[in-house]
Amino acid sequence: MLGDAFSEAATLILSGDPELFEILGLSIQVSLTALFFSIALGLPIGTALAISQFRGKKACVTVLNSLMGLPPVVVGLLVYLMLSRSGPLGVLGLLYTPTAMVIAQVGLITPIIGALTYQVMDDLHREYRDLFSSLKVPLAKAVPTYLWDARYSLITSVLAGFGRAISEVGAVIIVGGNIDHLTRVMTTAIALETSKGELAIALGLGIILLALALFVNALVTWVKTAGQKNAYV
Amino acid sequence: MPMSDSHNPKHSTVQVEGLSLTLGGKRLLHDLSFNTQTSGTTLIMGPNGAGKSLLLRCLHGLLEPDQGTVEFFGKPAHTQQRHQAMVFQKAVLLRRTARANLLFACQGSEARKKRIETLLSDVHLTEKADQPARLLSGGEQQRLALARALLTEPQILFLDEPTASLDPASVLIIERLIQEANERGVKTLFISHDLGQAKRLASDIVFLHKGQITEHSPADTFFTDPQSREAKAYLDGELVL
Ligand SMILES: Nc1ncnc2c1ncn2[C@@H]1O[C@H](COP(=O)(O)OP(=O)(O)O)[C@@H](O)[C@H]1O
Ligand SMILES: [Mg+2]
């Protein structure tokens, strides 16, 4: 029975089953969009926090670090409350749309990218601060230098964020609703199909998700190695 | 080079008045005053934890003293920032090639860019110019850091134990470049524990002990006839507590 499911799953993948690839396509689209906005938010937040000095900085860092560990279902619930009919953003009618899933994933991975960026930038800033002050490097030049010199670690953080976004289920199932042809992504489909006993499609998607996770991890390792080779990390 | 002021006998090259520094509620530098007329190397000596690094950082403007004034060539130190450079105890190098590290310090100045190749050869790094800077040996890294400091054509150069634990060849290259800079009229303030190096480079010695200057003497008398008990004990290799 399990063997049948496996061979059926393989057939689905190899035959390019349209439903399966529709789900895969939406997953990637939602997570890449979320990643884009999370980079746009998390990178400046982490960088600004690292190179600035103000009262309450420590508290901000603590908050950011704890947000990194937010359970996806909690993020999903919060976004749900915001977007639901009676919520503050209810009028936008975004609940159960891909946009809602993007928002939830942004909420989930922005803290991850922000916190990891902060750690990298904080280390680099401690190392470069005196040199930059000695060379009178203006802020407008210091910031791009920090970003460039942290490039390997930042790419790794971004990949970690993508890996988290594409593989989480708790948030997108709450705000997306796993609606066929609309908000069904890999993880929600796997959850649903498994509960329905439709193991073939669940397995097919599981295999693809696993392959994607392996690919992202291989990319992380490759980036790290490339950086270490030149002592650029 | 716009060095005319340094040859004006009216002005001290370095003048420090009543400099005090407190960090974390602890007073670490106590009312330091000294001035020197020489354009050579003023060596700062003293036991570990005496406050040598803190003093240098105050002079270079990396730390803000609570009190006191610092003047270079008769002008307030902060107005002279463009004419200062510093080499740190551990070379701070950007994550790029050796040459790119020098290029970074050019800050768009064509005159500086033109000096890159000469400086690379001065510090014997021409062959390694395109290697990642952080893969160079300790001595090579510190030579690169010195080249970067000299690239900015400073009138005052601060060096915080730049040659501690380096290979003799690197020490020689660094010392020679410092002497050449001194001959061009560059003022250097140099922290070192190395008595041989001190004798080779210093024109005068500021001796620091527990955040206080116990003595400021010309090099030729300091080593033969130190005036303070602390300096004498330090030179004799004793522990002063
Ligand atoms: N940020 C700081 N806060 C408190 N104490 C410091 C700080 N930086 C240095 N010190 C203390 O000041 C003293 C002098 O330090 P330093 O100037 O580095 O000594 P050295 O003469 O060996 O270079 C040391 O006892 C050190 O522990
Ligand atoms: Mg020191």
Image (cartoon, rainbow, N blue to C red):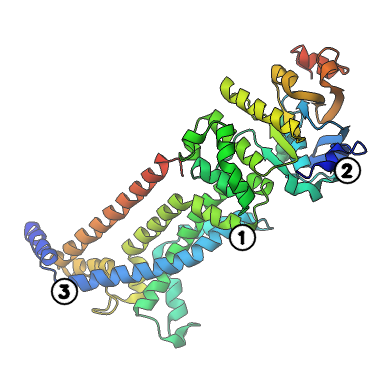
Quarter holding ligand 1: top right
Mark 1 residue element: helix
Q: Are marks 3 and 2 on the same chain?
A: no
In-image side of A26 versus A231 (left or right): left
The residue identified by callout 3 is: A18
Residues at circles 1 and 2 in contact by the CB criterion of under 8 Å: no
Please name whichever residue, B132 or B99, is drawn nearer the observer in this view of the structure: B99
Q: Please name the amino acid that badge 3 sits on.
A: Pro
The residue identified by callout 1 is: A140
- Above or below, A69 against A99 in this view is above
Please report the residue visible at 82 percent of the width from the left and 35 percent of the height from the top: B29
Please name whichever residue, A38 or B207, is drawn nearer the observer in this view of the structure: B207
Image quadrant where residue B69 sits: top right
Mark 2 residue element: loop
Please report the residue visible at 27 percent of the width from the left and 53 percent of the height from the top: A214
The residue identified by callout 2 is: B74
Label 1 to label 2: alpha-carbon separation: 32 Å
Residue A68 percent coordinates (x, y): 47, 58
In-image side of A175 versus A16 (left or right): right
Identify the chain of the residue marked 3, using the numbered disc in the image. Answer: A
Image quadrant where residue B156 sits: top right
Is residue A74 in sight in this rendering? no
Residue B4 percent coordinates (x, y): 83, 42
Mark 3 residue element: helix
For marks 3 and 1, the one nearer the N-term is: 3
Q: Nearer the viewer, mark 1 or mark 2?
A: 2
In-image side of A71 versus A117 (left or right): left
